[in-house]
Amino acid sequence: QVQLLESGGGLVQDGGSLRLSCAASRSILRLNAMGWYRQAPGKQRELVAVISSAGLKRYADSVKGRFTISRDNAKNTVYLQMNSLKPEDTAVYYCNADQGISAYWGQGTQVTVSS
């Protein structure tokens, strides 16, 4: 199993920046991928960004050019740098670890962007 702990959420103004961190309880080297998802009130959880074990990255169209996902294998941590935030980015952000047949989730961190 993998425990995931997110941090870095908060309240920011339109156009501001935040960096989310997701610390895993063990090495992330053998995980297929790690990613960030978000869920806004009344909406389904959606993919924001994912990074594979080989370092390949994929982003939702809505965040391309504004968000950057990265990983530090030595620290077992994945980051999501969020720039040019918009009110529509407001959501609970969840970290995900994909182990193939299993997937693990963090408890989520709230990001609120005020207009």
Image (spheres, rainbow, N blue to C red):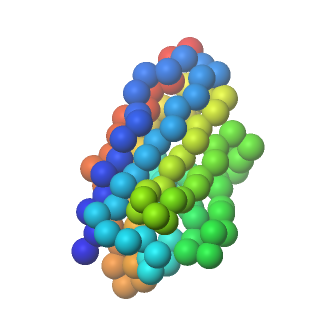
Q: Residue at x 35, y 47 (%)?
A: 6
Q: Residue at x 64, y 53 (%)?
A: 60
As displayed, is residue 83 above or below residue 26? above
Instruction: Give the camera-side residue of 19 and 75.
Output: 75
**How far across and down, in percent of the image, does residue 97 sit?**
40, 67
Q: Quadrant of residue 84?
A: top right
Q: Is residue 73 left or right of residue 86?
A: left
Q: Residue furthest right?
A: 65
**How far across and down, in percent of the image, does residue 36 sit?**
48, 54
**How far across and down, in percent of the image, does residue 55 sit?**
63, 69
Q: Is residue 79 left or right of residue 63?
A: left
Instruction: Give the camera-side residue of 15 and 45.
Output: 15
Q: Is residue 112 left or right of residue 13?
A: left
Q: Quadrant of the C terminus?
A: top right
Q: Residue at x 59, y 53 (%)?
A: 69
Q: Quadrant of the N terminus?
A: bottom left
Q: Residue furthest bottom?
A: 101
Instruction: Give the camera-side residue of 115 and 17.
Output: 17
Q: Would you say residue 50 is visible in this rendering? A: yes
Q: Residue at x 58, y 55 (%)?
A: 70
